[in-house]
Amino acid sequence: MLGRIALALSVLYVALNTVLLRWAAQEPRLIYFDDEEHFNATLAKLLRPRYVGSAGHSAVRDFIAEELERLGFIVTRDDFQEGANFTNLAGFWNVDADNFMMLTCHYDSKIPKDWNKEVFLSATEGAVSCGILLNVAKALGGFLAEKLHKKSDLGLALIFFDGHSSLSSDPLDEARLIGSAHFMDTEFIPIEKMAVAVTLSYIGAPSQTYASHFEVTDDLHNMIADVELLLKKSGQLTDCHVLFEKKKRYDNDLLDDHILFSELGVPVLHVAPQEVPKVLYTAADNAENLHWPTIRNMIKILRRSVHDFLEQWDFMSIMRIRLFYILI
Ligand SMILES: *[C@@H]1O[C@H](CO)[C@@H](O)[C@H](O)[C@H]1NC(C)=O
Ligand SMILES: *[C@@H]1O[C@H](CO)[C@@H](O)[C@H](O)[C@H]1NC(C)=O
């Protein structure tokens, strides 16, 4: 069984790199239009105290599920109890696909301890990342419906984890990653189907830059950095510092849900800054202290990158089947 998974993952890994090679040869064609009204409205729904057990927690959960459905995704929710009631949410295009590009974030926030629970909005802790994913999904809607839908072997999965930091206050405690651990334990998506996992976190503070944290997705990271440069050159970005730097920081990766995927050999890209935002876990982690040029450009860069990845994959399917037979 493990041998089969390893083989499947190595096939995926080769596929991933071939997709990237082909991607490198392409220039962006399609232009996506911004829908910041949608992002703002989405963020307003997410920006409320949403620690496990709170009214905001279930309201945000229901909002994300409804929004995914509205955007044409097939929504699956997994309710489970582990010291508290948690729910992981997943939205799929091509739910029966053999491979998935997974985009993940967590929607719950830490339980506030010492102060007013009503001002604990945790904007950069996860609200902005979830808002970005939903906005990217909306922008890609036409492409997903018209193009991705016709591919049977590749799907897109948006995963919204719960229980990210609920029951432990130690930021280095992996046991606190309750939602993603449960996701892996229940094989919500079988591991051999995970082509790549892209995890967003702690996005939205000023002066953030994003480096590569894993060797296996170095090329993917660099491709995204190139997408940023191309968009900048063609005048499509908001005035802002460079976000995706072509730097390797393998020893400086913030602990997050992606780590469980990485430990099992899934290629992982962690879209997270070098350090946690200064406002993290404080009342100041709110809308006023967000850095909008970072958010705007992150949306533009990611929607283009996800589009290109999904588009390039198609070309690979025949070759991948051949590779599979060579490898076995
Ligand atoms: C979205 O919200 C930000 C911050 O409040 C604001 O600057 C921006 O103009 C808003 N965008 C739209 C389209 O309303
Ligand atoms: C969890 O949900 C169950 C069933 O809905 C409920 O009876 C229970 O009180 C909940 N537990 C907590 C800790 O909220």
Image: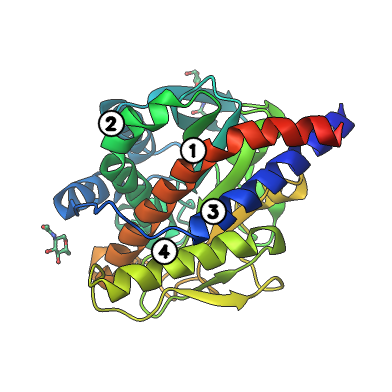
Residue, disc 4:
203
Dot 1 or dot 2, earlier in sequence: 2
Task: Please state the horizontal and vertical placement of residue 175, each as a whole percent of the image.
Answer: 70, 47
Q: Is residue 8 above or below residue 282?
A: above
Residue, disc 2:
71
Q: Amino acid at mark 3?
A: Arg
Q: Amino acid at mark 1?
A: Ile
Q: Residue at x 36, y 54 (%)?
A: 304
Task: Please state the horizontal and vertical placement of residue 256, each as a whole percent of the image.
Answer: 60, 55
Q: Residue at x 30, y 54 (%)?
A: 29
Front-most of residues 286 and 260: 260
Answer left or right for 315 relative to 34: right
Dot 1 or dot 4, earlier in sequence: 1
Task: Please state the horizontal and vertical placement of residue 82, each as a whole percent of the image.
Answer: 63, 31
- Element type at mark 4: loop
Mark linked to residue 319: none
Residue, disc 3:
22
Q: Residue at x 70, y 52 (%)?
A: 174
